[in-house]
C-alpha cells in the first residue's frame, strides 16, 4: 500500500503469477482472470503437488512457466500433459524465482500456511505488487515483511475478505481518526454449541462450514476461530494497529466482511455476498473497480444482519491472537506453526478438537521470545515449534 500502480493501469495487460493456482484462492483467481477478457493474463502458475489439475489450467491459460513446489513429484509427473509452450519447473526455489520474474506485474499469494512465506518474500524483494491471501505471511513475519515492503517499494494488497474490507473502509477517512477496526467472524459450525460438545467435535462436524467453501485447514481454523486469531495478528501488522484497537464480532451471515470505526462514532463497513472472487478482483484491479464474476446483493429479498460478541470462553483461541499481536517478535511464528501441526493431527484423528488450542497455548508458553528476529531465526523457530507440536501430548 506504499506504491500506486502506473498511470492508466487498464491500458496494458496485467501479467499475473498465481502461487497456489490449484487451491481455492487460485481457482477463484482464475475465474476473475477469465471474466476480465484479456485485460489480465496468468503468465505463471504454481501448485504444491496437484500436477494434473495444474496441467489442465496450463492448457487454458498457456503460462510461460508452471511450477510444482514438491520436487519429489518430478518422478511421477507426465510432462506430456503440459502444453509445449509452458516451461515446467520443480521445487520451492523455483516458486520464489517465479514470484520475482521480470514479466510478472502482480503476484497472487494463495499458498496456505507458512509454506507461502518464501514466495511472498521473494515477490516483496523484487518490489512487486502482491495480492496475498496467505495471512500466515504476516502472522509469521509481519514486522519484517512490512519493513521490507517499504524498503523495496512493494505494494501489499489484502485478498482475505476481512482485510480487504478494512482496506476499503479505511479509504473513507484519515488514519489518525480511526478508533478501531472490527473483524467480523462467521462463528463457524459451532457458533451455538456448548463448550463440552465443541471439545468433542468430530472431523466431519468441524469441516461442515455453514457459509464458506474452503480448504480443510482454513475450515478447521474457522471452527476453532483460530482463523480470526491469525487475522488479528495480520491486521496488527498490515494496518499498523495496536492490539487494543482491534476487535472481533460474530456475524453469521458473512455479508459485512469487516468494519472501521472512526473517532466521531461513524462505522464504515464493506458488504457483499460471501464470494472470494470480489476481494481477489479488487486487489488485481486496485485502485479501479470493474465488473466481474462475483455475486451481488439482492435487496428484493429480506436480509437480516446480526452481530454478537464472541464467547471467548468457548473459543479460547481468540485470546491467543490478542496476546501475540501485543507481544510480537517470534510469537506469531510459534503460534502459526503449532496450529498447522495441531490441525493436521486433528484431521488425522490424533487429537481431539478441544486439544487444538491447548496445544497451541502450550507451545507458545514454552518458547523463548525473541523480540526482533531475523528471517532465519523465524524459520528456525518455526521448525522448533513444529517438532514440539508433533511430540505434544496432553
Image (tube, helix red, strand yellow):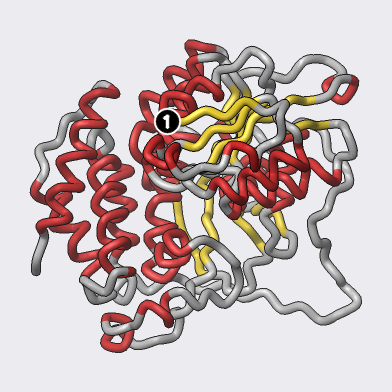
User: Which x, y percent locates residue 256?
Assistant: 66, 62
User: Which x, y percent locates residue 230?
Assistant: 40, 50
Location of residue 237 (image quadrant) = top left
Q: Can residue 193 be seen here? A: yes
When the figure is inspected, residue 57 is found, relative to residue 361, above or below; the finding is: above
User: Which x, y percent locates residue 322?
Assistant: 32, 51
379 left or right, relative to 119: left
Q: Residues within 10 Å of mark 1 (few under 14, many from 20)?
A: some
User: Which x, y percent locates residue 14?
Assistant: 78, 25
- Total count of labels: 1
53 left or right, relative to 191: right
Name the residue at 47% across, 65% down.
Answer: 219
Q: Can residue 166 be seen here? A: no
Location of the N terminus by quadrant is top right
Name the residue at 48% across, 11% down.
Answer: 151
Name the residue at 48% across, 72% down.
Answer: 187
When the figure is inspected, residue 226 is found, relative to residue 47, above or below; the finding is: below
In this view, the residue in front, 326 or 364, is: 364
Name the residue at 31% across, 76% down.
Answer: 314
When the figure is inspected, residue 189 is found, relative to residue 123, above or below; the finding is: below
In this view, the residue in front, 141 or 239, is: 141
318 left or right, relative to 251: left
Location of the C terminus by quadrant is bottom left
Under tag 1, what secondary structure?
loop
Residue at the disc numbered 1: 91
In this view, the residue in front, 212 or 301, is: 212
Amino acid at each position: 500500500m506504499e506504491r500506486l500502480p502506473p498511470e492508466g493501469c487498464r491500458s496494458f495487460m496485467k501479467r499475473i503469477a498465481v502461487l497456489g493456482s490449484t487451491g481455492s484462492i487460485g481457482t477463484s483467481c482464475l475465474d476473475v482472470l477469465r471474466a476480465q477478457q484479456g485485460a489480465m493474463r496468468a503468465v505463471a502458475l504454481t501448485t504444491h503437488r496437484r500436477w494434473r489439475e495444474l496441467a489442465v489450467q496450463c492448457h487454458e491459460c498457456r503460462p510461460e512457466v508452471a511450477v510444482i513446489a514438491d520436487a519429489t513429484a518430478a518422478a511421477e509427473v507426465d510432462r506430456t500433459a503440459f502444453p509445449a509452450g509452458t516451461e515446467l519447473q520443480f521445487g520451492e526455489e523455483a516458486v520464489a524465482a517465479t514470484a520475482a520474474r521480470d514479466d510478472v506485474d502482480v503476484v497472487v499469494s494463495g499458498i496456505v500456511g507458512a509454506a507461502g512465506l518464501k514466495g511472498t518474500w521473494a515477490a516483496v524483494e523484487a518490489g512487486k505488487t502482491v495480492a496475498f491471501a496467505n495471512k500466515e505471511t504476516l502472522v509469521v513475519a509481519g514486522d519484517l515483511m512490512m519493513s521490507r515492503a517499504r524498503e523495496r517499494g512493494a505494494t501489499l494488497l489484502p485478498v482475505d475478505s476481512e482485510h480487504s474490507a478494512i482496506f476499503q473502509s479505511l479509504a473513507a477517512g484519515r488514519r489518525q481518526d480511526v478508533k478501531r477496526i472490527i473483524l467480523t467472524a462467521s462463528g463457524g459450525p459451532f457458533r451455538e454449541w456448548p463448550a463440552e460438545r465443541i471439545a468433542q467435535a468430530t472431523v466431519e462436524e468441524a469441516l461442515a462450514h455453514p457459509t464458506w467453501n474452503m480448504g480443510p485447514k482454513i475450515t478447521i481454523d474457522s471452527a476453532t476461530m483460530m482463523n480470526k486469531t491469525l487475522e488479528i495478528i495480520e491486521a496488527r501488522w498490515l494496518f499498523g494497529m495496536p492490539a487494543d484497537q482491534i476487535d472481533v464480532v460474530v456475524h453469521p451471515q458473512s455479508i459485512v466482511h469487516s468494519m472501521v470505526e472512526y473517532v466521531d462514532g461513524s462505522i464504515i463497513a464493506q458488504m457483499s455476498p460471501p464470494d472470494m472472487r470480489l476481494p481477489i478482483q479488487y486487489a488485481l484491479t486496485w485502485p479501479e473497480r470493474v465488473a466481474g464474476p462475483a455475486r451481488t446483493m439482492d435487496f428484493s429479498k429480506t436480509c437480516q444482519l446480526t452481530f454478537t460478541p464472541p464467547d471467548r470462553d468457548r473459543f479460547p483461541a481468540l485470546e491467543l491472537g490478542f496476546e501475540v499481536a501485543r507481544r510480537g517478535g517470534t510469537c506469531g511464528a510459534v503460534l502459526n506453526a503449532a496450529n498447522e501441526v495441531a490441525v493436521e493431527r486433528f484431521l488425522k484423528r490424533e487429537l481431539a478438537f478441544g486439544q487444538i488450542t491447548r496445544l497451541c497455548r502450550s507451545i507458545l508458553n514454552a518458547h523463548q521470545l525473541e523480540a526482533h528476529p531475523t528471517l532465519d531465526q523465524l524459520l528456525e523457530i518455526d521448525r522448533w515449534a513444529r517438532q514440539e507440536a508433533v511430540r505434544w501430548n496432553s
